[in-house]
Image (cartoon, grey):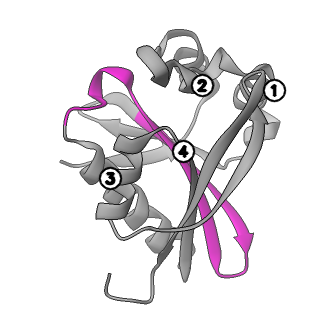
Amino acid sequence: MDYSFQTMTQQQAEEIAANWRYSGEYAFYDMDADPEDLAEFLDPEARNNTYYSVIQNGGVVGFYSFIQTAQDTIDIGLGMKPDLTDSGKGNEFLKAGMEYAKSTYNPQKITLSVAAFNKRAIRVYEKAGFKETERFQQATNGSVFEFVKMSYDCTSKN
C-alpha cells in the first residue's frame, strides 16, 4: 500500500486527539490518557514539525514523530488509526515509516519505545528487525509503567 507523509496540521492533531479511541488495554494510547502528552500533541510549537500524518487513499491512517536524538539516531513514535490496528497492516505501516526516516534523515540507527504490555506491537517491531536494548519505568497516564526501548541498525542487513 502507498503511504504519503505530510507535516501534521492542527486540524489533523485535533481530530486524532478527539476521535481516535483504542479498545481495552490499548486505551492507554488514547491521546487524552495523559494531559501532558495531549498538551504537547495539540501545541503546534511543541510538535515543532516533528509529527507527520500518514495519508492513504486521501485519509489519515496514522502518524509518526521523528526526533533526532543523536547525530546518527532517529527516535520514532507512531500510531495507527484505531480501526486499522490488529488487522495485519502494522508491518507495512512500520516499514513505510522506517523508509521515510531513512530517506529523510539517513540515520544509522532508529529507536523507539513501547509499553511492555503491548506484545502485538513488540512482535511487529521484532519482525521488522528491531532488538530490545533496555527496559525502563516511565511516569505517564497517572502512574508508572514499564517500557521497552528497541533499536534498529540501518547499516546491517537485518
Q: Which picture quadrant has residue 118? A: top left
**Does residue 148 appear anywhere in the picture?**
yes
| Residue occupying image coordinates x 50% and y 44% | 78
Cα–Cα gap, marks 3 and 4: 13 Å
Q: Where is residue 84 in the image (x, y as percent from the top left)?
A: 28, 28
Tell whether label 4 touches label 3 (CB within 8 Å).
Answer: no
**Quarter of the view holding residue 58:** top left
Query: Looking at the image, is mark 3 or mark 2 earlier in the sequence?
Result: 2
Distance, label 3 to label 1, CA atoms, is 27 Å
Question: Please, what is the three-letter code of the amino acid marked with disc 1?
Answer: Glu
Q: Residues within 10 Å of mark 4 (few under 14, many from 20)?
A: some
Check residue 45 for magenta coloring: no
Magenta range: 62-87
Secondary element at tag 1: helix
Circle 2 is placed at which residue position?
A: 13
Question: Tag 3: residue type?
Answer: Val
Residue count near mark 3 (Cα–Cα under 10 Å), binned few <14, some 14–19, many ≥20: some
Instruction: Looking at the image, tell me whether mark 1 or mark 2 is earlier in sequence order.
Output: 2
Relative to 113, is 86 above or below? above
Please name the amino acid that badge 4 sits on. Answer: Ala
Residue at image point 70% right, 30% down: 41
Question: Residue 61's image quarter?
Answer: top left
Q: Which mark is residue 36?
A: 1
Marks 3 & 2, CB-CB < 8 Å contact? no
Rounded to the nearest angstrom, the CA distance separating label 1 from label 4 is 21 Å
**In front here: 84 or 118?**
118
Determine the secondary structure under disc 2.
Answer: helix
Q: Earlier in the sequence, mark 3 or mark 1?
A: 1
